[in-house]
Image: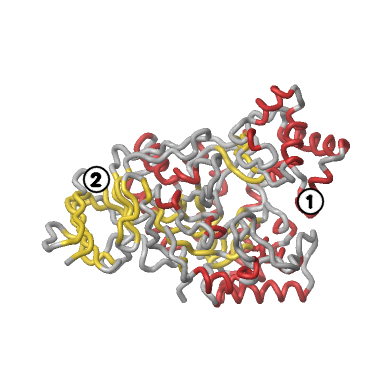
């Protein structure tokens, strides 16, 4: 007897091949048969007439590693069809924790002892035994390695510090980490030079892991920053992924992605292995300090920056830097999301708040940052649709959320809950950026191959039974920048490990996933 028998569906198997009609039988967490007219009893029969049956979606770039112990249900992942995520991105992983924290404390309000995170190995040994709502593979963040060894110092590591970082990388790889992520845009990763990154990446290469990067600059210096990451890929020999590839901040930067995608092609033609991923929105999201505070000042940390923002002269200097760079004084392109000092501002545009207060927009921004002790974030509407479509259509592009989970938050970038359903509804059905089979490949078999997930990403015999069933004519995202939690429509079933975990985009609470360890 089968556990699940999916009847009469149109199978898109993940390879990019055209759809075909077949039944899919599932038993003991595996796909055991894919063919027309499968006979036999099943504990559950799903009639997929008029629906598409695909592999479960793989989020190429996520940040839910912070929640594998505190919020393992991964609700927003499951409810958009994500059955696996590669987390620990942008240089910022949950482990290893900083040696500069001298006493046991709690991480935020998660209720988790920091001692569990001294090394990536410690975390993985614990997390691999905790059932997850959706599968998660974890990268080690380069910024987190730096914090653990040398704090926020704006300098090169000493020989001893470099060896400590290498030892931490090796520990993580030995215990099943997927590789290392670089966040060269963020402090303290932004203080590293290429040679440091190559040396750490060489350790990853020994284990045939992968490196990813939020490159140093995605705006004025996008091309230079792409070259820099390509140099790290070439210097280490690692497979690499350019994270959430885009060109933003100013209109004169739009269109540069055509050049950088060509650079990816040229790198691969030389025998290297380079990819990128993208989310389906024209707004980015990150913390405010990374967008508005000069890099050299970020080494002061949140407490130091909060104090610096009390100085009117410092505010004026930083305001002038930003106005000169962005070429405008308004902040109508900035929407507050996380703002603990002024929670009533969450979901609102900074420019609107400033007008209500009768303030210069930057004074309002600095007040928000100060009152939140710089622990605040926002969405930034500075990209163009043509670039999103151009990147999405490229043959080496995967789809991502660049997000964790809501964990009780009301306002966040809607990509957290809707990236995959939006891609299928808006960019495939409505815009025709690429075909449905090709987009499913970008969401399934391609990231599975890139990240070494040998039993995922395909509707084939003996593959893991991670499956999505949806109506290709109706699937659509409903979440917006002001209604972030609205669930998708047209996503009928999500199956993880051979069990139905969501129907009609509502998670039933089952935790059938796990923390995935890199396969040797």
Along the line of sight, the residue nearer the viewer: 199 or 125: 125
Instruction: Identify which residue, 177 or 69, lies in the foreground.
Output: 69
The residue lying toward the viewer, choosing from 111 and 270, is 111
The residue lying at 48 percent from left, 50 percent from top is: 400
Residue on which the image places disc 2: 51
User: Mark 1 or mark 2, which is nearer to you?
Assistant: 1
Total labels drawn: 2
Q: Position of residue 17 (x, y in %)?
A: 29, 54
> At x 72% / y 28%, what residue is drawn?
328
In the rendering, at what x and y percent does residue 514 appear? Answer: 43, 65
Q: Is the residue 179 above or below the residue 379 in the image?
A: below
Which image quarter: residue 188? bottom right
Q: How far apart are the two marked residues, 1 and 2, measured between alpha carbons?
A: 53 Å
Callout 2: few (<14), some (14-19), or many (20+) C-alpha neighbours within 10 Å? many
Q: Provide residue 22's location: percent of width, then percent of height.
A: 18, 55
Q: Is residue 476 depicted above or below 65 in this figure?
A: above
Give whichever of discs 1 and 2 has the lower sequence position.
Answer: 2
Q: Secondary structure at mark 2?
A: loop
Left or right of 259, for residue 33: left
| Residue, disc 1 | 303
């Amino acid at each position: 007897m089968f556990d699940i028998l999916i009847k009469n569906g149109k199978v898109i198997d993940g390879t990019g091949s055209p759809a075909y009609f077949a039944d899919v039988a599932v038993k003991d967490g595996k796909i055991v048969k894919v063919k027309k007219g499968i006979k036999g009893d099943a504990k559950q029969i799903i009639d997929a007439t008029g629906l598409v049956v695909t592999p479960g979606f793989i989020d190429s770039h996520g940040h839910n590693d912070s929640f594998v112990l505190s919020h393992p249900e991964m609700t927003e992942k499951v409810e958009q069809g994500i059955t696996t995520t590669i987390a620990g991105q942008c240089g910022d992983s949950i482990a290893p924790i900083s040696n500069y924290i001298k006493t046991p404390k709690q991480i935020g309000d998660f209720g988790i002892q920091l001692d569990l995170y001294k090394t990536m190995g410690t975390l993985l040994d614990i997390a691999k035994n905790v059932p997850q709502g959706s599968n998660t593979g974890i990268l080690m963040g380069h910024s987190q390695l730096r914090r653990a060894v040398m704090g926020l110092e704006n300098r090169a590591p000493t020989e001893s510090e470099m060896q400590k970082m290498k030892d931490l990388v090796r520990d993580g790889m030995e215990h099943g980490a997927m590789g290392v992520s670089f966040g060269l845009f963020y402090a303290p990763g932004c203080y590293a030079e290429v040679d440091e990154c190559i040396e750490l990446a060489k350790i990853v290469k020994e284990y045939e892991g992968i490196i990813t990067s939020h490159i140093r600059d995605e705006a004025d210096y996008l091309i230079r920053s792409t070259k820099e990451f390509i140099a790290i890929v070439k210097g280490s020999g690692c497979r690499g992924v350019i994270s959430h590839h885009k060109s933003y901040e100013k209109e004169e930067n739009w269109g540069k992605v055509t050049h950088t995608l060509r650079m990816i092609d040229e790198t691969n033609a030389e025998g290297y292995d380079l990819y990128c991923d993208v989310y389906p929105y024209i707004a980015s999201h990150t913390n405010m300090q990374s967008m508005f505070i000069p890099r050299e000042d970020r080494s002061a940390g949140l407490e130091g920056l909060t104090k610096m923002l009390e100085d009117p002269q410092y505010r004026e200097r930083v305001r002038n830097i930003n106005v000169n760079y962005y070429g405008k004084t308004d902040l109508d392109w900035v929407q507050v999301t996380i703002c603990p000092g002024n929670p009533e501002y969450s979901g609102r545009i900074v420019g609107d708040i400033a007008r209500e207060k009768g303030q210069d927009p930057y004074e309002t921004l600095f007040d928000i940052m100060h009152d939140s002790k710089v622990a605040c974030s926002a969405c930034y509407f500075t990209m163009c649709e043509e670039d999103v479509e151009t990147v999405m259509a490229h043959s080496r592009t995967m789809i991502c959320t660049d997000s964790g989970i809501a964990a009780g938050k009301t306002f966040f970038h809607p990509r957290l809950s809707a990236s995959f359903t939006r891609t299928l509804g808006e960019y495939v059905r409505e815009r025709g950026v690429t075909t449905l089979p090709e987009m499913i490949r970008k969401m399934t078999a391609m990231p599975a191959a890139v990240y070494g997930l040998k039993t995922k990403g395909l509707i084939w015999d003996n593959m893991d039974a991670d499956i999505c069933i949806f109506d290709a004519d109706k699937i659509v995202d409903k979440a917006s920048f002001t209604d972030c939690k609205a669930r998708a429509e047209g996503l009928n079933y999500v199956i993880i490990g051979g069990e139905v975990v969501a129907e009609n985009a509502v998670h039933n609470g089952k935790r059938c996933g796990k923390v995935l360890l890199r396969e040797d």
